[in-house]
Image (cartoon, helix red, strand yellow):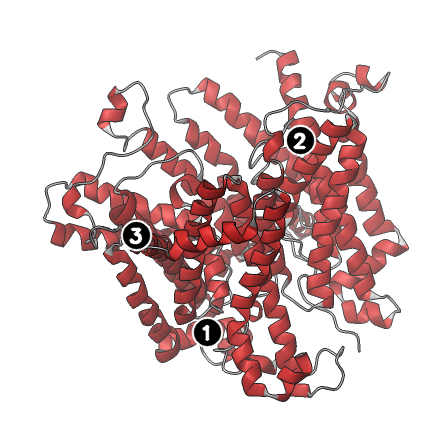
Amino acid sequence: MNDSQLIAVLASIVLQASPLIIAVCGEIMTERSGVVNLSLDGTMLMSAMTGFVVGLRTDNYWLGFLAAAVVGMIFAGIVALGSIRLGQSQVAIGFVLALLGDDLSAFLGQNYTRMSGAVVPKAGIPLLKDLPVVGPLFFDQNIVVYFAIVLVFVTWWWLNRTQAGLQLRGAGERPTAAFARGVNVNRVRYLYTILGGALVGIAGAAYSLNVKIGWSDGHVRGFGWIALAIVIFGGWSPIRGAFGALLFGATKALATVLQRAFPEVSVVAFNALPWLLMILVLLAVGSDYTERFITAMPHSWQRPLRRVLRVSPPMALGTAFHEG
Amino acid sequence: MVDFLVKYPRLGRLFDLFLPLLATLAALGVGAIMLQLLGANPFVAYSALLKGAFGSQNALADTIVRATPLLLVGLGICIAFRAGVINIGGEGQFIAGALPATLLGLSFPDAPAIVLVPAALMFGFLGGAVWGSIPGLLKAYFNVNEILSTIMLNMIAVQMMNFLLRGPMIDPVQLQAASAIPQTARLNTAFDLPRWIPTRLHAGALLAVVLAFVVYILLWRTTIGYRIRAVGFNPAASRYAGINVKRNIVLALLLSGAFAGLAGAVQVYGVSHRMITDGSAAGFTGSAGFNGIVAALFGKLHPLGTIPAAFIFGALIVGANSLQRAMQVPAALITALNGLVVVFVVSSDIFSRRLARRRQIGVAEPGSRGAGEQGSGGGGEAAAGGDHWPAG
């Protein structure tokens, strides 16, 4: 493989990862505020379908993204309403919505399978795209990829450097303390669950309008679950999450390359590879044994190692908050 | 109406019992609107559905056949959810049980059926147990979220099945034919589970019902079951009471997987008599691994409640198929209809629990929450499904 081929593969990894990055950023916001939106897989199927159909009918991909975001907000809104207002289990609602989204998208989208519609055009950024290596990777893509890249940093900045982000984290870590400081915890949770849902919706449309263009039954099935796993892998940090999404894309690309190199090995071994890797990663970041390993290291290494190898969820994740 | 039910608790409790049924009816009501929009007469459609599910001896038998894997998977789900772990790996465990069971039958085609069939079902049970124990071990000893690991293991099981059915386990006839359909050879007809001729009803259904009672006894009449439920109810308190929480989590997921695996083996020996794949999990399992969860939730996570719940879902699936044939409505409407039923059933729990709360705190403070929230579970037996979903 020569250099230009390698760059092309790497650029395609960035492209493939972009919807996952968007979804992961959305879900991170939701989960950092204390709500688990488990419906991602169904939401993305529904929004991918909606985005594609609206794009096709109006011949305008912007409207497709808009419609997809609305679908994502509706799904997330149901999760928020069910868990916050009605006191129902977030996991139960999310799981049921994940199944419903799958079924509903298949039903509503059945007349639009295997058609070609609006797609997001490629738009390189002048000057920047001519940079060596970085140019073709990040700046000779299209608006979706740029959005994903910018979103990672905006999300990080929002979470860690703004007043609103502090309130968000407060709601997810110590809701009672946040409440005592005058934060309307449940309103914050509504807001970020729905905002996160909008991003997940956009991610779904990013598949059907850009990365995996078109619609068929179960078009993006599985990616929602992957996104949820990446959120954990990323330790609820957008930058690490984006890294995880790229890593997942790289594993898939690697599987394709390896498969070409070793045709005698069954294709399923490579198909199973990303999933297996995800389990191993989840195992590594959560395990007590990793903690023991870190503790055995020299003292000055421990902090940086822990930052890389360990994650812990927001403390109040998935729990209900009642005022007073 | 709600006040009325609060006033007469016994009536209210009866109402709770029928709530899932009412939810199903409500979902069918929404489905009727969808049918109307598609230009089909909902009354004609639903009578076709009923006739397809219960209309004849054969229809009824098919309903029970469809309900059997749902019940078996659902029993496992009851165990896992009662232990506070969410097993979404039914699809993978179903496959992990079916594969070794099929392999055994293919390897010893001349063995006496009386020995081989029970052994094959045992293999299915064990295969599912192995596949289920993996997320159990990961959760108990490595803090890996079981929702995610079971989903990943579903994907891996599908790949494993595709690999085996396209290569090592493929039907030699298919290998020679140009079509090369990824399926195994048909198992020796002597191994077919006893069948109630002329229908497709097989002995697996009876086995499933018997096992429902076994699981009930296990969960509520043995120490093992007590420990599993205690761990689900309050892990911290269980630990102080000397219960090994980790071991019970593994045990619950292992048993949960085992029942799904048995469902896979029963499906092979009772219905399909071979394994065949279209590349996806649902192609072989018919989504029994997911629908079993729904059936268990529908049955309030009680093994005996899961029996009628699975039956109703089986009826819905069979009836919906004949509705589709009769009315020429798109197949996807049926899955959407099933999804609607699930949503309505689960959300009916919300209503039921609010009612229980209001019964406790009286009719006052309609909007208040918090008070009496914990108490509504009672012994855990009558608790609504939602109570047993641990926080993410």
Q: Mark 3 points at which residue?
A: B58
Q: Estimate the spatial distance between the alpha carbons at disc 1 and disc 3, rounded to whole Å.
A: 39 Å
* Residue B108 shows in this picture: yes
> Do circles 1 and 3 both sit on a common chain?
yes
**Front residue of A68 and A171:** A68
Residue B234 location in percent, x, y?
A: 54, 75
Query: In terms of image quadrants, where is residue A22?
Result: top right
Looking at the image, is mark 1 or mark 3 nearer the viewer? 3
Q: Estimate the spatial distance between the alpha carbons at disc 2 and disc 1, rounded to whole Å.
A: 44 Å
- Amino acid under label 2? Ser
**Front residue of A268 and A162:** A268
- Amino acid under label 3? Asn
Residue A55 location in percent, x, y?
A: 74, 30
In the rendered view, does A323 fall on the left or right side of B34?
right
Q: Name the residue under label 1.
A: B229
Quadrant showing the N terminus of chain B: bottom right
Name the residue rendered at 64%, 27% in the picture.
A214
- The chain that hosts pointer 2 is A
**For marks 1 and 3 on the same chain, the one whose residue lies earlier in the sequence:** 3
In the rendered view, does A64 fall on the left or right side of A12?
right
Q: Are marks 2 and 1 in contact (CB under 8 Å)?
A: no
- Amino acid under label 1? Arg
Query: In terms of image quadrants, where is residue A56?
Result: top right
Name the residue rendered at 50%, 45% in the picture.
B152
Looking at the image, is mark 3 or mark 2 nearer the viewer? 3
Q: Name the residue under label 2.
A: A208
Q: What element carries label 1?
A: helix
Quadrant showing the C terminus of chain B: bottom right
